[in-house]
Amino acid sequence: MNFNGFTAHDFEAFHIQGLEERMAAIQERIQPKFKLLGEVLADDLSVMLGQEMYLHIARHARRKVNPPNDTWLAIAHNKRGYKQHPHFQVGLFDDHVFIWTAFIYELPGKKEIAQTFLDHIDFLNNTIPSDYAVSLDHLKKEAESWGSLEAQQALSRFRDVKKAEFLIGRHIQADDPVLQDGNAFYELVKETFETLFPVYQLALKQEAARP
């Protein structure tokens, strides 16, 4: 793997004004790195799951005016798309990298998955490290730690509010030295996905049970 990590130059792409100009920087600076990193991670997750996992790189094709504030790779068990399935993400805002196991609002079985999480809240507490980050909206930078989260309330909202989401993982600040070491960052992402894999499997089992 020739992935060498992320640098200040990559994060500066989000300070470029204009949709076309920012997208050109994302395509030139960040997406090639996503491909290198994502292909290896997809192979790792395929082995863990026992079935093929597919890499998807955000294209932001629906944007016509406003440039994206973040960009990401996603890995899912569906070749055609990832948003309607539990999936894994690695992405950048202008000030941090996020590493997520993601359950976003497009999930057809969102209510059932949320209820499954509520029914297994002790399992989640025993599986998710207290310092892991949780986001309830993938469009926002903000996240709080699992240890400080009102998990019952957050998961109930995830179940009951159409646009509510649930993403678990890590935030790595842009100036963290681990980002500049490709192998070290890859190992960190792999470790994060491995830690959260039981949560992903719990959701996947619920998804498979849908009629």
Image (cartoon, helix red, strand yellow):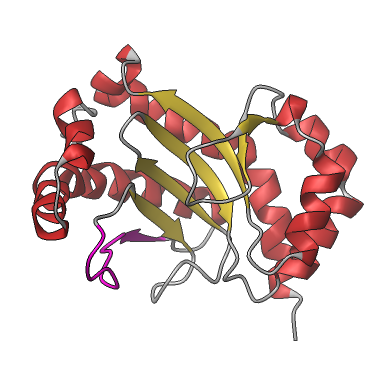
Image check: 116 left or right of 168? Answer: right
From what the image shows, is residue 209 above or below residue 85?
A: below
From what the image shows, is residue 101 above or below residue 65?
A: above
Q: Residue 123 placed where, x, y %?
A: 84, 40
Start-end of magenta stretch:
54-66
Quarter placement of the N terminus: top left
Report the number of numbered marks. 0
Q: Residue 113 placed where, x, y %?
A: 75, 63
Q: Nearer the viewer, residue 104 or 182?
A: 104
From what the image shows, is residue 85 above or below residue 23?
A: below
The residue at 57%/51% (across/down) is: 137
Outermost residue, bottom side? 211
Q: Nearer the viewer, residue 43 or 190?
A: 190
Quarter placement of the C terminus: bottom right
Predominant SS of the magenta segment: loop
The residue at 47%/51% (across/down) is: 139
Residue 188 belongs to the span the image colors magenta: no
The residue at 24%/20% (across/down) is: 180
Q: Residue 90 placed where, x, y %?
A: 40, 43
Residue 55 belongs to the span the image colors magenta: yes
Quarter-of-image position of residue 168: top right
Q: Residue 131 placed where, x, y %?
A: 65, 22
Q: Nearer the viewer, residue 164 or 177?
A: 164
Image check: 33 left or right of 117? Answer: left
